[in-house]
Amino acid sequence: MLMDKEDFDNKIIGSNVNDEEVVVDLEGELISALEEIARLRFKKKKKKKLLIQFEKDNKKPDEDFALLKVKLEEAKKIEDILKQQLSETKVRCEALE
C-alpha cells in the first residue's frame, strides 16, 4: 500500500496536521506551479519570436548576397556581349577603310 509523502512525514514526526490543511497547502503549491508554468510559457514565446526574427535577419543578408551575385554574373555577361559587339564593329570599320 502506497502512502502520501505528507502522511509519511506526519507519522514520522508525530504531527497532527489534518487533511484539510494539507489539501490547502497542495492547492497553493499547485496554483503557484501553474503560475510558474504560465510565466515560463510566456518567456518561451518571447524567446521563440526573437529567435525567429534573428533567423530571418540572418537569412536576409545571405539572400541579398545571392541576388547581388546573380546580378553581377548578368552584368558580366552583358559586358562580354558589349565587348564582342565592339570588337565586331572595329573589324567592320577597319574593313570599310
Image (cartoon, grey):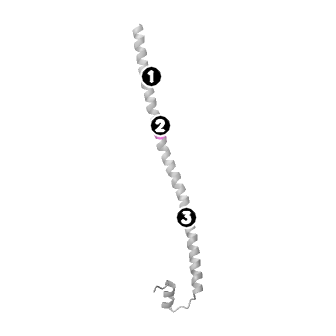
Above or below residue 28? Residue 63 is: above
What's the magenta region? Answer: 64-68
Q: Label 3 crowding class (10 Å Cα cut-off): few <14, some 14-19, many 20+?
A: few
Q: Earlier in the sequence, mark 2 or mark 1?
A: 2
Numbered disc 1: secondary structure: helix
Between the C-alphas of marks 3 and 1, the distance is: 61 Å
What is the secondary structure assignment of the residue under circle 2? helix
- Relative to 56, say whether 95 is above or below: above
Farthest residue to the front: give it. 1
Q: Amino acid at mark 2?
A: Leu
Amino acid, disc 3 = Arg
Residue 12 pos. (x, y %): 48, 90
- By secondary structure, the bulk of the magenta-drawn segment is best described as helix
Q: Which residue is mark 3?
A: 41
Q: Which residue is mark 2?
A: 68
Image location (x, y in percent) of residue 29: 56, 77
- Which residue does the image show at 48% across and 47% down from the upper left? 59
Give the class, few, some or many, for how many residues have Cα within 10 Å of label 2's Cα (few <14, many ≥20). Answer: few
Inter-mark Cα distance, 2 to 1: 21 Å
Find numbered disc 3 in the image and state the secondary structure of the residue it sits on.
helix
Crowding at label 1, few (<14), some or many (≥20) Cα neighbours within 10 Å?
few
Residue 49 picture quarter: bottom right
- Which sits earlier in the primary sequence, circle 3 or circle 1? 3
